[in-house]
Image (cartoon, grey):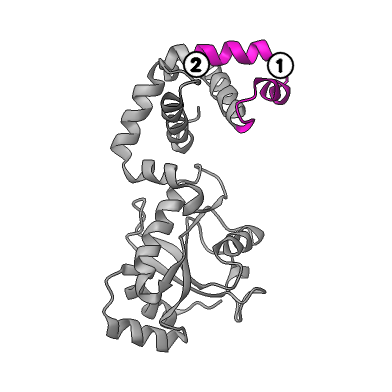
Amino acid sequence: MRRGTRYGALLGPLLAGGATPALVTRAARGLGLPERGRYAVVVLGTPVPDAAVAEGPDADGSRWWWGAAEGSPGGAESREVAVVLLGPAGPARAAVRLRELGAGPGGVSPVVGSLAEVGAARRLAGTALLTCEPGSREIVRLDERLPAALLVSRPELSTRLLAEVFGPLLALVPAERSLLVETLETWLECGGSVGRAAARLGCHRNTVFNRLRRLERLSARSLSRPRELVDLVLALDVLRLSSAPP
């Protein structure tokens, strides 16, 4: 893992996207990287931990080059960004490595096949970062958060979805609203099992039924209709990603 002015100067044009073939070749030579290979990009929302910037490859052979990207998604002027030449374990191992080092929040792009594509990968990693819950230390891969990534990519539609699905719910007092949201989240995490949700919440299964039925009335959507359940799940993601508590 490396970092410095020289590396940043070579990485910057690649991460900005649209680099010419000549520029890609020059950067590859200067960084000691192959033009073609299995690459991913990491975008962090906080400063990179010192332990993450060290010479030499990871245990699985991954090699990291840290820099900064101007104009990253989310409105930030710059972000801590790494281009990773992946080892056999792929981007999942890169995410684990960052979690072990206490980095985060952060987003990890899908795999791309060349240095010329790291600009597009940086944009996707930035979108993945936007799916992290406010105040969290999550490290997430875009491929794990595709529905939420679609939502954060179109904030005006996300706002409309939240108002349309959860408008009456949001009008409740915070404690009441939080109780219903927690019950829905737990029911989803339990695979739609009311009994398992009740056990996890420490209440009777009829209590869970009643809360879910109330949420259905407030949202005018049924948990038993797949298309309407999709609305509820997506609206729940928007609520999770908002800065306001449920």
Residue 194 placement, left or right of 18: right
Q: Between 69 and 128, which is closer to the camera in this rendering?
A: 128
- Looking at the image, residue 243 lies above or below residue 227: below
- Residue at coordinates 29% horizontally, 36% vertically from top-left? 156
Residue 5 picture location, percent across and down: 42, 80
Q: Quadrant of residue 188?
A: top right
Is 22 left or right of 201, judged from the image as shown?
Answer: left
Label 1 amino acid? Cys
Residue lying at 61% horizontally and 33% vertically, measured from the top left: 189
Give, as a single range, the part of the protein colored magenta.
189-215
Expressed as whole percent of the image width and height from the top left, the position of residue 175 reads 56, 18
Q: Residues within 10 Å of mark 1 (few under 14, many from 20)?
A: few
Mark found first going from the N terminus, 1 or 2: 1
Q: Main secondary structure of the magenta part?
A: helix
Q: Give, as a three-letter code, the residue at label 2.
A: Leu
Q: Secondary structure at mark 1?
A: loop
| SS at circle 2 | helix
- Location of mark 1 (residue): 203
Tell me the residue at 31%/68% (across/down): 16
> Marks 1 and 2: CB-CB under 8 Å?
no
Q: Which residue is mark 2?
A: 215
Q: Is residue 226 above or below residue 203?
A: below
Which image quarter holds the N terminus? Answer: bottom right
> Quarter-wise, where is residue 196 in the image?
top right
In percent of width and height, residue 87 lies at 58, 73
Question: Is residue 246 rendered magenta in the image?
Answer: no
Residue 62 spot, x, y in % from top left: 58, 74
